[in-house]
Image: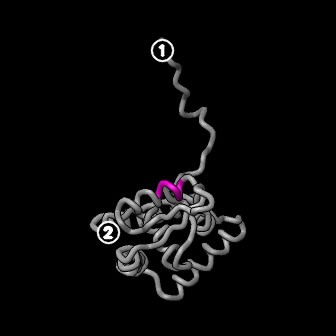
Amino acid sequence: MKVAMAKKDSKVDASELTKHIGFWMRLVSNNVSHAFGRKLEASGVTVAEWVVLREMYAGDDTTSPSVVAELTGLTRGAVSRLISRILAKGLVIRKESAEDRRYQDIKLTKAGIEIVPRLAKLADENDEEFFRVLSQSERRGLTSTLRKLATAHNLTKMPIE
């Protein structure tokens, strides 16, 4: 069975992919994230795990998966899987509540506390590599624009995993 091919002259005008701001944002974002992921490989931590570790590092000594989910914008299921992975790597400990076994406290281990500043340095280096072509003023402007867009569209969930 032959499928009829549309003639070129019957095509409707469609804007070029590269004319879309979203194309350029995704191109840069994906490459920044991918490069950071490669830098993290030696540490044995993924970008998604880094986000959880960094949020835990910034917070209270002990927290819960639901708090981490709220902080990162990830679902509780995604956070639970990430915590299980970083638990297996010895970067967090998990303790079930004596009163309610569904409730868990999680806490960074000494190794987890020690790795976060090293990984933050890699994140800083990665940003510097990608954005060094921009002046400090351009970087502030880009950050301000992206925050404005995130706020305007109520973007609170992390695009990870």
Eyeballing the image, is 106 above or below 8?
below
Pointer 1 or 2: first along the chain? 1
Which residue, as the protein is rendered here, is positioned at the far top? 1
State yes or no: residue 84 in magenta.
no
- Visible residue check, residue 126: no
**Closer-to-camera residue (53/94):** 94
Q: Where, by quadrant of the figure, is residue 156 drawn? A: bottom right
On the image, numbered disc 2 is attached to which residue? Answer: 39
On the image, numbered disc 1 is attached to which residue? Answer: 2
* Mark 1 neighbour density, 10 Å: few (under 14) some (14–19) many (20 or more): few
* Mark 2 neighbour density, 10 Å: few (under 14) some (14–19) many (20 or more): some
Question: Element under label 2?
Answer: helix
Residue at the image position 48 percent from the left and 54 percent from the top: 81
Residue at the image position 51 percent from the left and 73 percent from the top: 56
Judged left or right of residue 127, residue 141 is right
Image spot of residue 120 (x, y percent): 41, 78
- Disc 1 + disc 2, Cβ < 8 Å: no
| Marking on residue 23 | none
Image spot of residue 64 (x, y percent): 57, 66
Judged left or right of residue 117, residue 77 is right
**Closer-to-camera residue (14/53):** 53
Residue at the image position 40 percent from the left and 78 percent from the top: 113
**Closer-to-camera residue (152/120):** 120
Disc 1 versus disc 2: nearer the observer? 2
The residues colored magenta run: 78-82
Q: Amino acid at mark 1?
A: Lys
Q: Main secondary structure of the magenta part?
A: helix
State yes or no: residue 80 in magenta.
yes
Question: Element under label 1?
Answer: loop
Q: Amino acid at mark 2?
A: Lys
